Image (cartoon, rainbow, N blue to C red):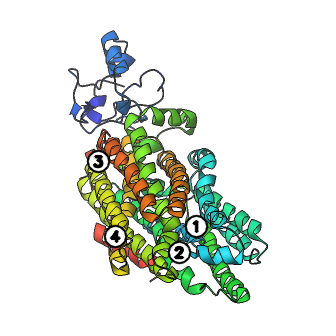
Amino acid sequence: QGPHDSEAGSVGVVAPAGKQGWHFPPSPSGLSPNSEGVQQRKPNGFLPGKEAERGSPAAGADARALPEAQAMLPAPDSGPGVARAPIRLSWRRLAVLAVFSLYSLVNAFQWIHYSILSSVFVRFYRASYTRVDWLSMVYMVAYVPLILPATWLLDTRGLRLTALLGSGLNCLGAWLKCASVRQDLYPVTLLAQTVCAVAQVFILGLPSRIAAVWFGPKEVSTACAVAVLGNQLGTAIGFLLPPVLVPNTVDDTDLMGHNISIMFYGTAAVSTLLFLLTGVVFDEKPKYPPSQAQAVLQDVPPEDYSYKQSIINLFRNIPFVLLLISYGMMTGAFYSVSTLLNQMIVTQYLGEEVNAGRIGLTLVVAGMVGSIICGLWLDYTKTYKQTTLIVYILSFVGMTIFTFTLDIGNLVIVFVTGGVLGFFMTGYLPLGFEFAAEITYPESEGTSSGLLNASAQIFGILFTLVQGKLITDYDPRAGNLFLCAWMFVGIILTALIKSDLRRHTVNSGILNTDIKAVSDLTFFISVVLLHLNI
């Protein structure tokens, strides 16, 4: 490279020891980022570390002193004579997003439909509440040991294979449930739910990856929110539909089994259709990169990527570790509330199983609205830390209000407080994914979001077990206060996170470029129509 390379915008930063092969991407003006993310030119116009390539000891010291945030990006082999693929958006991204959201929906439905009918399945399988709760908690247990293999598969074998595995296992688990509708076949239904739980491992880590690979910088947060929305919608339908399909026919277990069969076979049919659509719609990536950040990453030879080093980099990233713990606390609390909602409501309001499902629906639908609003807000403002912290605080406030209004004897108030809780608590989920993608770029979005989900599952298991015990031994208020205490700790950890928006720094140089894309409004309307199958 010649001295004019910095003018061409092709200069990279040499990585410090242990990070060989990764370079900070070029800025449009050949500037280097300081600790605040502001680009600063070195006296000779080169980025720190470029002189080290030419043998300057002083510059070598600069390169070794670079913070990790500046040492992780691949150096593109682009010069004045090397053209990078144009930045364009594909309409196919909407189909990919819609199909993913729908099979994620079915997977979430299969997670929650046991716990919202806990009293029904306790009677049908002649099992304890604890055994029925495990039909929900198996989702959390399966995720923890399998997340690293799943993210390795995503990073090394790609998006299409991972999507097919998630959709295919979801379909297989649904059909296995159809063979478990007999009172002595609890082990079979547990096996089927375990298969669905394994499918979830290949699903939950994809929203931020799909958003990053297929969507442009002005819509990536909205796309991630819509992908997460599919899972939330499945939870909402899981709260609403099962109590209607499978009423608690206490004196007629044959009718109960028939109703359960209808629910299981319907789920299996939909899962099969979505598996076929996944095979048709999903591609590894679009023909052209949708953003400068993706264009930079696509220049990295596959042999230069190290999954092990990526994991090490993430755990050395202190802001990410803080987010990992705080995200786990918030989402684990949401999982616990969702799993135990039926028990909480029925404990305070006897015989209100149907209203328990409706309250769960209210909680999740409000959260879906919160997710979309938060996604649009992030795309507009890029205020990741501020938004995440505010939503975390408001979730804590909502949980506190829900705790102290649950037992006042008025279901209308419980509906309202449940909606407020859901708006903020569920709306937080895509914020965590996108914040992690920003502060860990260029590490794989699938790996960072997978670790976030693993943290959520671990906290979810612990919170569900402890809160369930507190509800049984004391009352729902004791269990909810337990969650409030941990959410307060999460607020403190979130406040300590340093906001280092690496991906935004890369994309900010081309935000005014003429990208062939539909407007944000057209994009949002298209996604809504696809969700409604219009």
Callout in the foreground (1, 3):
1
Q: Callout 4 environment at 10 Å: few (<14), some (14 to 19), or many (20+)?
A: some
Q: How many marks?
A: 4
- The foreground one among 135 and 515 is 135
Instruction: Quote the CA–CA distance across marks 3 and 2.
Output: 32 Å
Q: Secondary structure at mark 4?
A: helix
- Tell me, for residue 405, which label it has, or none: 4
Instruction: Quote the CA–CA distance across marks 1 and 3.
Output: 30 Å
Q: Amino acid at mark 3?
A: Lys
Callout in the foreground (3, 2):
2
Q: Is residue 303 left or right of residue 236?
A: right
CB-based contact (under 8 Å), mark 3 and mark 4: no
The image position of residue 362, as x and y in percent, is 40, 75
From where the camera sits, is residue 16 visible? yes
Instruction: Quote the CA–CA distance across marks 4 and 1.
Output: 27 Å
Q: Callout 1 environment at 10 Å: few (<14), some (14 to 19), or many (20+)?
A: many
In the rendered structure, which disc, 4 or 1, sits on the residue that comes first in sequence?
1
CB-based contact (under 8 Å), mark 2 and mark 4: no
- Asked which quadrant contains residue 262, the reply is bottom right
Callout in the foreground (2, 4):
4
